[in-house]
Image: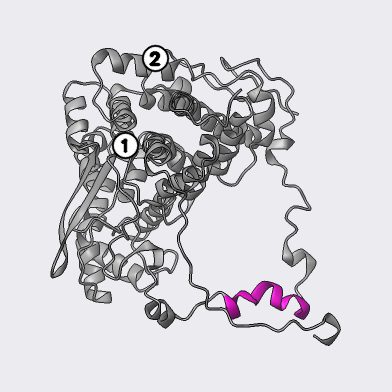
């Protein structure tokens, strides 16, 4: 039994049984190994191979757009949006022509939003979120009102923490954030209301509450593992999203203005990335059915968790640590290239043959998010004595495409994506690795909200793609004759 004191968020909880945070129910799910695999279970566990693996030539025969992608790799057009534009190539009569990457929020280049906010030494995420949700840049008065509406929602609902800490056990904090989001549905008196006013209020409440929710989950796991008290600082009035995140995660350690400004850059870059990315499309699919906001956003979190989407930053971080240990001289380009060659051949790291952090479905010559991160991260890397690691990442970015061309014969342009530098920045800011993707979700909520509202009030039709059945006929055989 460990005593938990939670400062500033609801009643203080004492004598909370931490076994609820660390105990895995023995019978759910029962591992198959424990039951023992026998021939009678072969069909159960391996039958999919006979029916679910569709021959590749059939996709061509029926002109299936696998992954909702055309044969040239471009996305299948399924909707129209005024929210953002992700530019990485031009489509001409000759095919797809690579181009420098660009990212626009409501017609404004995201790099301009970042640069102008930082030129005035102010935080820009809230301005970007307001722009995405409303379609217009805020006046000073509108921005102050927007921040205040988020600020007054940072407290978690009374009674929430009496339930939530007891259910925080998880191998991944993203699942915790999903459960917390669905739990907040129960504290909303009109959770199924899809009027514009309620939709905005739900988004504002999650922007205010998610940082503290994720922090409580992280700190609860640490407290349970170390036998210490769970201490989360009270909300600090007037803090930006970046400052709030650093405050709840670092507590008494504090943070500098420059650190908060760099995190603000990360939040702005993660705020939106077009309707075609997996988590945003998930938001739109669920929203098209008319379901509640909490369900739509919880589903988007589940999508973002995937290692092919937001969870990719964890893979990049692990790969970089592996490279750091196995490359004796990070400044030696030949040693870096040798490691990358072994990586592509499947001889290093996880054997996948992938250089995580390189390549993107849309961007070809450059990812504007990676460009912006490098621009602002270099200064902090110098201040923290992390120049060598920063230089290693730059070498991987520059040499990786050459290695992939020489080893695999890849001819299309390959650039560094945002994930190559994300983990490095977060580690410099002292953010725990299990929070990386959660922070991505917190930032992306602004984009999810904009796309949800566009789907609810603009598109007006439930999303329902078609699948062509290629199954054969079956004649029912009585069980006694099988």
Count of number-bearing discs:
2
Q: Alpha carbon of mark 2 to alpha carbon of mark 1: how far?
A: 22 Å
Residue occupying image coordinates x 24% and y 55%? 363
Magenta stretch: helix, strand or loop mostly: helix
> Is 71 left, or right, of 210 in this rendering?
left
Residue that lies at the very extreme toward the bottom in this rendered image:
481
* Residue at screen point 46% across, 29% down: 199
Residue 465 occupies quadrant: bottom left
Q: Position of residue 202 (x, y in %)?
A: 49, 27
Residue extending farthest to the right is 480
Q: In the shown orientation, is residue 307 left or right of residue 87?
A: right
Tag 2: Cα neighbours inside 10 Å, few (<14), some, or many (≥20)?
some
Q: Which residues are magenta?
A: 38-51
Label 2: element kind: helix
Mark 1 lies on residue = 266
- The stretch drawn in magenta includes residue 452: no
- Mark 2, mark 1: which one is toward the viewer? 2
Say left or right for 317 vs 359: right
Q: Residue at x 36, y 61 (%)?
A: 326
Q: Quadrant of the N terminus?
A: top right
Q: Which mark is residue 191?
A: none
Q: Is residue 41 magenta?
A: yes
Residue at the image position 33 percent from the left and 30 percent from the top: 129
The secondary structure type at the circle numbered 1 is helix
Asked which quadrant contains residue 383, the reply is top left
Which residue in the structure is indicated by mark 2? 148
Residue 118 position, x and y percent, is 20, 26
Residues 40 and 345: in front is: 40
Q: Position of residue 140 (x, y in %)?
A: 24, 14
């Amino acid at each position: 039994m460990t005593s938990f004191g939670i400062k500033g968020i609801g009643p203080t909880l004492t004598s909370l049984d931490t076994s609820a945070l660390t105990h895995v129910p023995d019978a759910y799910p029962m591992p198959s190994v424990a039951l023992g695999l026998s021939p009678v279970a072969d069909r159960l566990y391996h039958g999919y191979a006979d029916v679910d693996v569709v021959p590749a030539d059939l996709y061509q025969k029926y002109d299936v757009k696998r992954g909702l992608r055309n044969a040239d790799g471009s996305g299948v057009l399924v909707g129209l949006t005024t929210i953002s534009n992700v530019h990485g190539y031009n489509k001409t009569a000759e095919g797809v022509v690579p181009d420098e990457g660009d990212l626009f929020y409501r017609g404004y280049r995201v790099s301009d939003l970042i640069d102008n906010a930082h030129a005035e030494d102010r935080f820009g995420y809230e301005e970007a979120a307001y722009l995405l949700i409303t379609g217009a840049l805020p006046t000073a008065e509108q921005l102050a009102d927007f921040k205040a509406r988020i600020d007054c929602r940072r407290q978690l609902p009374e009674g929430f923490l009496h339930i939530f800490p007891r259910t925080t056990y998880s191998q991944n904090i993203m699942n915790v954030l999903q459960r917390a989001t669905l739990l907040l549905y129960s504290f909303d008196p009109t959770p199924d209301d899809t009027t514009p006013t309620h939709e905005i209020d739900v988004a504002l409440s999650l922007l205010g509450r998610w940082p503290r929710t994720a922090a409580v989950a992280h700190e609860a796991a640490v407290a349970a593992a170390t036998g210490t008290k769970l201490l989360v600082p009270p909300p600090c009035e007037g803090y930006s999203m970046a400052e709030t995140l650093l405050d709840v995660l670092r507590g008494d350690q504090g943070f500098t203005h420059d650190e908060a400004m760099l995190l603000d850059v990360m939040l702005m870059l993660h705020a939106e990335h077009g309707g075609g990315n997996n988590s945003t499309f998930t938001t739109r699919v669920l929203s098209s059915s008319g379901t509640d906001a909490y369900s739509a956003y919880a589903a988007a979190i589940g999508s973002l968790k995937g290692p092919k989407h937001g969870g990719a930053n964890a893979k990049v971080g692990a790969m970089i640590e592996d490279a750091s240990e196995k490359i004796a001289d990070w400044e030696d380009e030949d040693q870096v290239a040798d490691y990358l060659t072994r990586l592509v051949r499947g001889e290093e790291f996880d054997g996948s043959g992938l250089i995580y952090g390189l390549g993107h479905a849309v961007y070809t010559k450059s990812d504007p998010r990676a460009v912006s991160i490098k621009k602002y991260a270099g200064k902090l890397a110098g201040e923290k004595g992390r120049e060598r690691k920063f230089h290693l990442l730059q070498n991987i970015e520059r040499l990786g495409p050459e290695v992939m061309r020489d080893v695999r014969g890849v001819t299309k342009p390959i650039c560094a994506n945002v994930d190559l530098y994300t983990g490095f920045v977060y580690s410099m800011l002292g953010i725990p690795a299990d929070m990386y993707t959660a922070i991505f979700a917190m930032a992306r909520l602004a984009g999810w909200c904009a796309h949800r509202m566009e789907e609810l009030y603009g598109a007006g039709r439930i999303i329902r793609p078609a699948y062509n059945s290629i199954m054969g006929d079956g004649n029912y055989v009585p069980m006694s004759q099988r």
